[in-house]
Image (cartoon, grey):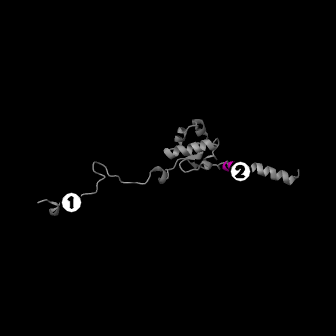
């Protein structure tokens, strides 16, 4: 087999792994990942985090946004030992408004809330 064919074969075999390899770009010293905003691919840059753990963190934060980075240990599969190793690379900024709270909607409460408002009682409303 020629060198060109061997190189093409090697490239074809490595191509499916390219996104995973790109996601594992090491973190720079002092670089931090926000647990409330990072995508699964960004979380996978942390040491010891694969696709499943990253997806578990994202799924957990959709229900329970992180108030502090330490809360990541509440996610199934995330140990306190792992957190101790990567704590310098984690942050938990205030969750984005679209995730933390839905749109504010005023709801009428009490009996008759579903009825239309009554007109004020005046002389025209009185019966003779």
Residue at 58% from the left image edge and 49% from the top image edge: 33
At mark 1, the secondary structure is: loop
Whole-percent x, y for residue 117 in the image: 27, 57
The C terminus lies in quadrant: bottom left
Magenta run includes residue 16: no
Q: Which residues are magenta?
A: 19-23
Whole-percent x, y for residue 122 in the image: 16, 61
Relative to residue 117, is residue 56 drawn left or right?
right
Residue at 49% from the left image edge and 44% from the top image edge: 63
Relative to residue 11, is residue 34 drawn left or right?
left
Looking at the image, the residue that sits furthest to the right is 1
Relative to residue 91, is residue 127 drawn left or right?
left
Whole-percent x, y for residue 59 in the image: 54, 44
Looking at the image, the residue that sits furthest to the bottom is 124
The answer to whether any part of residue 64 appears in the image is no
Whole-percent x, y for residue 20 in the image: 68, 48
Instruction: Name the residue that disc number 1 marks.
Output: 120
Other-residue count near label 2 (Cα within 10 Å), few / some / many at <14 / 14–19 / ≥20 = few
Decide whether the magenta segment is chiefly helix, strand or loop.
Answer: helix
User: In terms of sequence position, does the residue under pointer 1 or pointer 2 come before the other?
Assistant: 2
Query: Closest to the observer: 12 or 18?
Result: 12
At mark 2, the secondary structure is: helix
- Please give the label number shown on residue 85: none
The answer to whether any part of residue 120 appears in the image is yes
- Please give the label number shown on residue 18: 2
Q: Nearer the viewer, mark 1 or mark 2?
A: 1
């Amino acid at each position: 087999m020629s060198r060109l064919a061997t190189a093409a074969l090697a490239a074809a075999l490595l191509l499916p792994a390219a996104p995973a390899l790109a996601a594992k770009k090491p973190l720079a010293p002092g670089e931090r990942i926000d647990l409330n905003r990072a995508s699964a691919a960004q979380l996978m840059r942390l040491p010891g985090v694969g696709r499943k753990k990253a997806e578990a963190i994202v799924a957990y934060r959709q229900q329970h946004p992180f108030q502090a980075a330490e809360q990541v240990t509440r996610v199934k599969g995330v140990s306190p030992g792992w957190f101790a190793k990567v704590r310098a690379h984690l942050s938990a900024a205030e969750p984005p408004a679209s995730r933390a709270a839905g749109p504010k909607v005023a709801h009428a409460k009490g009996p008759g809330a579903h009825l239309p408002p009554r007109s004020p009682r005046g002389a025209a409303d009185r019966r003779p």
